[in-house]
Amino acid sequence: MNIGDVSARTGLPAKTIRYYEDIDLIKPLRDDNGYRRFRDQDVHKLNFLGRARALGFTIGDCRTLLALYEDETRASADVKQVARDHLAQIEAKIADLNAMREALSHLIDACAGDDRPDCPILQDLGGKG
């Protein structure tokens, strides 16, 4: 398969596929003319990577998960730990977003939103809140 076929089958842009090759996450074969030749196993890895990235795993996490996936002697505890660490990062981001929402909601409630120039939102952003 060529990169266009693989892109269509995986839903990943060709640029992303090339990037994954550049950072050695996948290693397609090369024809004599230099064109990439993808195998079913490459497509499977790309689908794996696409799903992992959709769940927010970093490239480093993807590299670790892919190595664990390919290691038939892996301990599922190792996989679970990578997922737990990622979940903790997601939960921290959610907490940060909730704090931002609360702060912004408070500022919006404090702003009269009328014709007067006084605005607690701008005062806070300017460090005068």
Image (spheres, grey):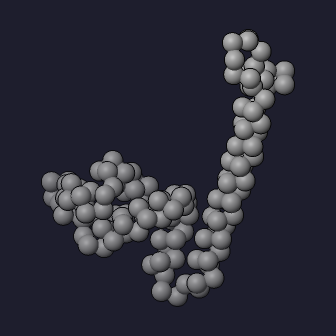
Q: Residue 61, position in %: x, y? A: 56, 63
* Residue 50 visible from this viewpoint: yes
* Image quadrant occupied by the N terminus: bottom left
Q: Nearer the viewer, residue 94 or 20?
A: 94
What residue sits 52% from the left and 88% below the top?
Answer: 73
The residue furthest right is: 128
Q: Residue 66, position in %: x, y? A: 47, 71
Relative placement, left or right, of 111 versus 41 is right
The residue furthest bottom is: 73
What residue sits 20% from the left and 59% below the top?
Answer: 5
* Image quadrant occupied by the C terminus: top right
From this view, report whether residue 77 is shown above or below residue 6. below
From this view, report whether residue 78 is shown above or below residue 47. below
What residue sits 72% from the left and 53% below the top?
Answer: 95
What residue sits 65% from the left and 74% below the top?
Answer: 81
Q: Residue 77, position in %: x, y? A: 63, 82
From this view, report whether residue 126 is shown above or below residue 37. above
Q: Quadrant of residue 128?
A: top right
Q: Nearer the viewer, residue 77 or 109?
A: 109
